[in-house]
Image: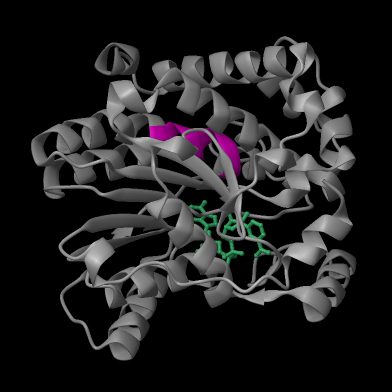
């Protein structure tokens, strides 16, 4: 997967696949939906007659502003709800999942869109570096906590809900691979938290690589046949959003040049997410982009014997963290 291929993708025309036939009466959760791709995804779902769209945001005021914006453009009131979710905190994830359990009658889709791009080392609660916590650890934690709830709703309503993760084409580049190779084969998460070994200019790509491994393992551990839930992941392409806002001026300038040359709008990028949300069970564990399955983006070094070992190890460590944060979670899923 070369950068040339990623750039070539940018010019593909993307369809809007949701409408009132696909979404009428359905309930969706979109994390990080106060701006960027999440906001545009939520707007499409409301426009397509969903009955409830939860904006899961860390800043409630920004969430309320997004809700007003969606209501103004779609003229649909009473659909959007704004709920608090801060992915830097496992307690916040637990509170969010408990609220979803208590208040959502059905859940047709969970779109795990929230993410950060950081190039300075900051710590989240629990002492793990912030972008690894937000983009990987608590994103997967939310998926794992929501899965049993979504399975129960799937049974009650005879539906096949989706969990969609946002990854990135940068995950498949050698920069991310090299960063991961610096980390040992045991205690991968511990190794990823060694500030001295990690290059922050490659950190975002690395988080997306680790997330890709984790999603593949998650989908393999909970196959569709067992859960009736489709778990897949999507790279939305290069889109004009404020994702790089917290990075250095040099990084922002470089991003700015690339985006000016080839970027999709956030609305265009959201179409790829909607495609993943509608995609059927044949996309279980698969990587999608440009409204197509793009498994060829998954590199041979990710699927060879070493890659498989890495995937297993990452998954084992994430499950252990989840079990630690939510004792008994494993039994709920078995
Ligand atoms: N834009 C691209 O070119 C591109 C390419 C590939 C993949 N992606 C992925 O697409 C997803 C959406 O990004 P975007 O481009 O739309 O960027 P964005 O506009 O910056 O949106 C990111 C969203 O995540 C939220 N978020 C950040 N940290 C959070 C936390 N701790 N808890 C809860 N929410 C948090 C942000 O909230 P605040 O507004 O409060 O910060 C914001 O709503 C990300 O996962 C990103 O990695 C983007």
Residue 62 sits above or below residue 226 on the image: below
Pick whichever, 55 or 223, lies toward us.
Answer: 223
Asked if one can make out residue 31 in the rendered structure from this viewpoint, the answer is: yes
**Magenta residue check for 157:** no
- Picture quarter containing residue 200? top right
Q: Is residue 189 left or right of residue 57?
A: right
The colour scheme applied to this rendered structure is: one colour
Magenta span: 135-143
Pick whichever, 201 or 176, lies toward us.
Answer: 176
Which quarter of the frame holds ligand 1? bottom right
**Magenta residue check for 136:** yes
Expressed as whole percent of the image width and height from the top left, the position of residue 79 reads 20, 71
State the quadrant of the C terminus.
Answer: top left
Residue 123 sits above or below residue 291 on the image: above
Residue 15 sits above or below residue 172 on the image: below
Expressed as whole percent of the image width and height from the top left, the position of residue 237 reads 67, 62
Expressed as whole percent of the image width and height from the top left, the position of residue 326 reads 35, 22
Q: Is residue 211 left or right of residue 85?
A: right
- Picture quarter containing residue 67? bottom left
Q: Residue at x 37, y 68 (%)?
A: 42
- Picture quarter containing residue 123? top right
């Amino acid at each position: 997967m070369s950068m040339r291929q990623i750039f070539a993708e940018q010019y593909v025309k993307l369809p809007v696949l949701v409408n009132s036939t696909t979404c009428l009466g359905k309930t969706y959760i979109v994390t990080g939906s106060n701006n960027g791709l999440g906001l545009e995804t939520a707007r499409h779902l409301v426009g397509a007659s969903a009955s409830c769209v939860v904006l899961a945001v860390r800043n409630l005021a920004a969430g309320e502003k997004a809700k007003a914006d969606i209501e103004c453009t779609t003229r649909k009131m009473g659909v959007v709800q704004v709920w608090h979710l801060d992915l830097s905190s496992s307690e916040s994830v637990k509170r969010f999942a408990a609220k979803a359990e208590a208040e959502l009658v059905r859940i047709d889709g969970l779109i795990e869109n929230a993410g950060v791009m950081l190039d300075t080392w900051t710590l989240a609660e629990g002492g793990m570096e912030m972008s690894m916590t937000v983009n990987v650890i608590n994103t997967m934690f939310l998926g794992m906590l929501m899965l049993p709830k979504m399975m129960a709703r799937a049974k009650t309503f005879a539906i096949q809900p989706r969990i969609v993760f946002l990854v990135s084409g940068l995950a498949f580049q050698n920069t991310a691979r090299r960063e991961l190779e610096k980390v040992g084969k045991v205690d991968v998460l511990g190794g990823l938290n060694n500030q001295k070994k990690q290059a922050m200019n490659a950190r975002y790509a690395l988080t997306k690589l680790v997330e890709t491994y984790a999603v593949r393992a998650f989908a393999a551990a909970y196959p569709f046949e067992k859960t009736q839930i489709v778990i897949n992941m999507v790279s939305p392409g290069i889109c004009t959003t404020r994702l790089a806002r917290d990075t250095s001026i040099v990084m922002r300038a470089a991003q700015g040049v690339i985006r000016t040359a080839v970027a999709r709008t956030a609305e265009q990028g959201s179409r790829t997410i909607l495609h993943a949300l509608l995609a059927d069970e044949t996309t279980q564990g698969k990587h999608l982009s440009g409204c197509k399955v793009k498994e060829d983006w998954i590199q041979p070094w990710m699927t060879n014997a070493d890659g498989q070992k890495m995937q297993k190890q990452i998954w084992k460590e994430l499950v252990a963290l989840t079990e630690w944060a939510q004792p008994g979670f494993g039994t709920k899923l078995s």
